[in-house]
Image (spheres, rainbow, N blue to C red):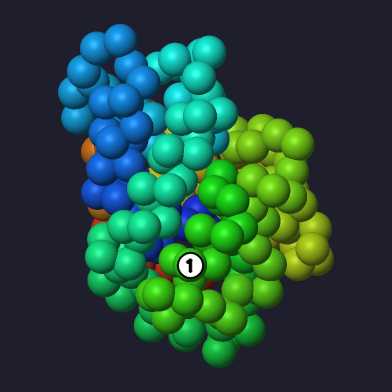
Amino acid sequence: MSIKTILFDLDGTLIDTNELIIASFTHTVKQYAARPYTREEILNFIGPPLRDSLAKVNAGQVEAMVTTYREHNVANHDQFVTAYDGVVNTIKELKSEGYRLGIVTTKMRHTVQMGLELTGLDGLFEVVVTLDDVKHAKPDPEPVLKAMNQLNGLPEQTLMVGDNTHDIEGGKNAGTLTAGVAWTIKGREVLEELEPDFMLSHMNDLLDIVGG
């Protein structure tokens, strides 16, 4: 095995946006849902595309909910979002060693760029595939394949890293190796059930994996 291309999910993997997402969902659901939602219920909304999650709350008000959510999310972005420990240094080291690096996310490009700039990750990835760039989001293989192909990667030499079941399933569906992150807010056991090839306890574990 020789890994040459590494693809990353963004939220919950490289940058900690969990509390921002939860706050934005809570703010939105309070206005549009027929009942209050618990934190545990809202956790299930993290990962899938925003519209898919909000449709489960109030299918007739999805567009209004998206607007409410995004206004809250952007307004409160910078006070919540940080990079996870070791992420920036690890990404910089991988880039310096010649690995082809990309991001595959279900977020829209505008908020992706906000997160990258805020956390010092902007400019470190050759390819960023967002929800704007595809017809089908993860776990469909389309976004993973799109990023991999733009980096001239081969599935057997590509690693998809993520914090959500959609990331692991998306990588498997595209034929890549997969790595879960133990700091996922959903609990590492949720990812371990999908049997990823690797489980990262810290982002710098990647340096041992690709080096080995």
Q: Nearer the viewer, residue 7 or 122?
A: 122
Q: Is residue 31 above or below residue 99?
A: above
State whether residue 176 appears in this view: no
Q: Residues within 10 Å of mark 1 (few under 14, many from 20)?
A: some
Measuring 33% from the left and 42% from the top, which residue is drawn there?
Answer: 24
Instruction: Find residue 17 and report its horizontal and vertical position in percent.
Output: 33, 54
Horizontal side of 116 relative to 28 (left or right) equals right
Q: Secondary structure at mark 1?
A: helix
Q: Relative to residue 139, is residue 202 drawn left or right? A: left
Q: Farthest residue toward the bottom? A: 96
Whole-percent x and y of residue 161?
49, 54
Give the residue pinned by disc 1. Answer: 114
Front position in the image: 77 or 107: 77
Residue 131 visible? The answer is yes
Q: Residue at x 53, y 60 (%)?
A: 112
Residue drawn 67% across the image and 74% down it: 126
Give coordinates of residue 26: x percent, y percent.
26, 33
Question: What is the total number of numbered labels drawn onto the structure image?
Answer: 1
- Measuring 64% from the left and 52% from the top, which residue is drawn there? 130
Q: Work out whether 193 lies above or below 95.
A: above
Q: Quadrant of the N terminus?
A: bottom right
Query: Is 152 drawn above or below residue 164 in the view shown?
Result: below
Q: Quadrant of residue 154?
A: bottom right
Q: Where residue 185 sits in the image (x, y, percent)?
A: 26, 43
Q: Quadrant of residue 77?
A: bottom left
Q: Amino acid at mark 1?
A: Met
